[in-house]
Image (cartoon, rainbow, N blue to C red):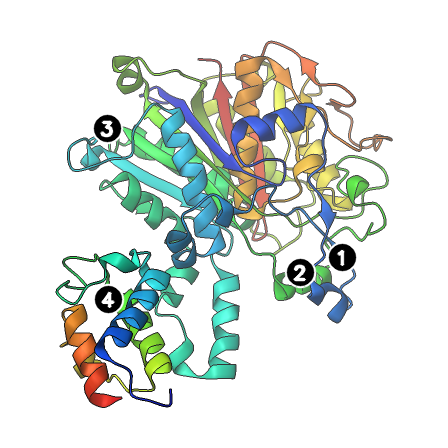
């Protein structure tokens, strides 16, 4: 990616990844949603989502950081800060 | 003798002949063929001498939701598909928090497999080699483990009385059913979802079977390649598929007015202690398996009118089994060999063929053995050929034997 993506673009990208990995409709992937409690995503799928997000946005998401990404909004902020 | 009556109330399967039990049964009665040319590019790449396979008639990924399919190995996919069919056929709804059709503490699973998920194992190894750790799926272990099919079924149907997987190669599906019957006898469960599944068609498994010289190389005539008991048989055709039955304590089934297909009245399970792939020359293990099944059911050999043979279409195996049937039960037995149509489903075989056996009792019809043009004179048994045989059956045995010297005979009787 040549330019830094906007938060909205990061959210759209994450939503596509979550849809692909976990089958959650992209419209349901909003910033306030918890991956585990709201979107019913398990720890195995979270690893897949993190790897795909790393590739898509060109960031690194170490395991100890991944553990802190409780909501979709957390993930958007993390990517935005590190991209 | 058994103390508790155990009946079969639900059936499910996905096979090279059809995506469910009724299509598989109808195809079997019509004498249709499930063996195809294996068009995978690796067959030519490695110049494999056996270029045939009995692949599934219905792709499991076309049946399952996309996300579920990508989380399951193919072997797990087909076990889940067959289990859903059997569960619904038994009259049960998928459990929810509001409604659990069977008390989870009284429900168990017993689904065997020969290998489990070797395709996942090998594919993920390729990914590790080519792309490194990051690209290896976090689902690798649960997809390759042989207890995965049983575990997924147990989660979906909420079985908390135990989820078990037996691995006895090509006898696994039958042993899964026998073990389920024993669980109900022992009082561990009222209902057990039982059977077997296999989806191991991969270059290395085919190459390995080729090197053990067990596969048919009749590549120019796939529809005629699997020919148990025929003088021109030259090996089996590797297939893939799953069979699942719902076994239930008879009084539990009666209390809810369930339809009963047949009763499971006993089994025999022995081991050859002889050779890792070869039959015992006198067939002592096979004979003892059938004899023990008859004894456990409180019957005599003369009561067994029909055997659904393991008969894989190998030169040595078919004759050995025929001799064992004659010695254990007598020459009156009417035999059929469904692998002529279905191919060899390895860990799924004993389950799918148990379903065929009990449907033969239920419908009073034994499917014919396809491709049996010239009966090997050493068979010495009445093998059904041409058209299905209409015959009222009180008791029948399904034989399933496996590499390792495993011999399993499951005895079904009319309900």
Disc 4 vs disc 1: which is toward the camera? 4
Q: Are marks 4 and 3 on the same chain?
A: no
User: Looking at the image, do the residues carrying marks 1 and 2 touch, with CB atoms under 8 Å apart?
Assistant: yes
Q: Nearer the viewer, residue B115 or B382?
A: B115
Q: CA distance from mark 1 to mark 3?
A: 46 Å
- Residue bearing mark 3: B101
- Residue bearing mark 2: B206
Q: Secondary structure at mark 1?
A: loop
Q: Position of residue B331 (x, y in %)?
A: 71, 20
Residue at 36% x, 31% y: name it: B87
Q: Secondary structure at mark 4?
A: helix
Looking at the image, is B131 positioned above or below residue B181? below
Q: CA distance from mark 2 to mark 3?
A: 42 Å
Query: Chain letter of disc 1?
Result: B
User: Looking at the image, do the residues carrying marks 1 and 3 touch, with CB atoms under 8 Å apart?
Assistant: no
Q: Are marks 2 and 3 on the same chain?
A: yes
């Amino acid at each position: 990616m040549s330019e830094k993506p906007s938060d909205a673009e990061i959210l759209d990208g994450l939503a596509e990844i979550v849809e692909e990995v976990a089958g959650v409709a992209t419209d349901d992937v909003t910033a306030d949603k918890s991956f585990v409690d709201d979107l019913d995503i398990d720890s195995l799928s979270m690893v897949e989502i993190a790897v795909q997000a790393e590739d898509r946005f060109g960031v690194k998401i170490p395991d100890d950081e991944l553990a802190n990404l409780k909501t979709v909004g957390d993930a958007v902020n993390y990517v935005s800060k590190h991209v | 003798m058994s103390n508790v009556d155990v009946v079969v109330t639900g059936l499910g399967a996905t096979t090279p002949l059809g995506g469910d039990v009724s299509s598989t049964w109808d195809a079997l009665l019509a004498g249709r063929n499930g063996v195809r040319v294996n068009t995978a590019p690796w067959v030519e790449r490695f110049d494999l001498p056996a270029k045939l396979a009995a692949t599934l008639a219905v792709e499991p990924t076309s049946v399952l939701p996309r996300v579920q399919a990508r989380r399951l190995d193919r072997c797990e996919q087909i076990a889940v598909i067959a289990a859903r069919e059997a569960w619904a056929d038994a009259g049960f709804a998928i459990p929810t928090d509001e409604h659990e059709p069977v008390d989870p503490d009284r429900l168990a699973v017993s689904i065997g497999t020969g290998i489990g998920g070797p395709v996942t194992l090998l594919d993920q190894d390729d990914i590790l080699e080519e792309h490194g750790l990051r690209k290896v799926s976090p689902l690798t272990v649960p997809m390759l483990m042989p207890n995965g099919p049983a575990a997924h079924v147990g989660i979906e149907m909420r079985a908390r009385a135990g989820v078990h997987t037996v691995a006895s190669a090509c006898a696994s599906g039958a042993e899964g059913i026998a073990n389920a019957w024993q669980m109900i006898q022992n009082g561990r469960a009222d209902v057990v979802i039982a059977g077997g599944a296999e989806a191991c068609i991969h270059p290395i498994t085919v190459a390995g079977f080729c090197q053990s010289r067990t596969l048919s190389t009749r590549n120019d005539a796939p529809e005629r390649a699997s020919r148990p008991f025929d003088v021109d048989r030259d090996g089996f055709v590797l297939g893939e598929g799953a069979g699942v039955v719902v076994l239930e304590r008879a009084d539990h089934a009666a209390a809810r007015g369930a339809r009963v297909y047949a009763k499971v009245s006993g089994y025999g399970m022995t081991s050859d202690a002889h050779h890792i792939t070869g039959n015992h020359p006198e067939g002592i293990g096979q004979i003892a398996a059938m004899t023990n099944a008859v004894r456990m059911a409180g019957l005599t050999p003369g009561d067994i009118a029909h055997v659904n043979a393991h008969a894989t279409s190998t030169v040595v195996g078919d004759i050995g089994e025929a001799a064992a049937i004659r010695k254990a039960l007598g020459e009156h037995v009417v035999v059929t060999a469904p692998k002529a149509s279905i191919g060899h489903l390895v860990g799924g075989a004993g389950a799918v063929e148990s379903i065929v056996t009990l449907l033969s009792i239920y419908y009073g019809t034994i499917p014919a053995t396809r491709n049996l043009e010239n009966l090997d004179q050493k068979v010495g048994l009445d093998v059904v050929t041409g058209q299905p045989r209409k015959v009222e059956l009180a008791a029948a045995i399904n034989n399933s034997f496996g590499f390792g010297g495993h011999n399993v005979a499951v005895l079904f009787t009319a309900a």
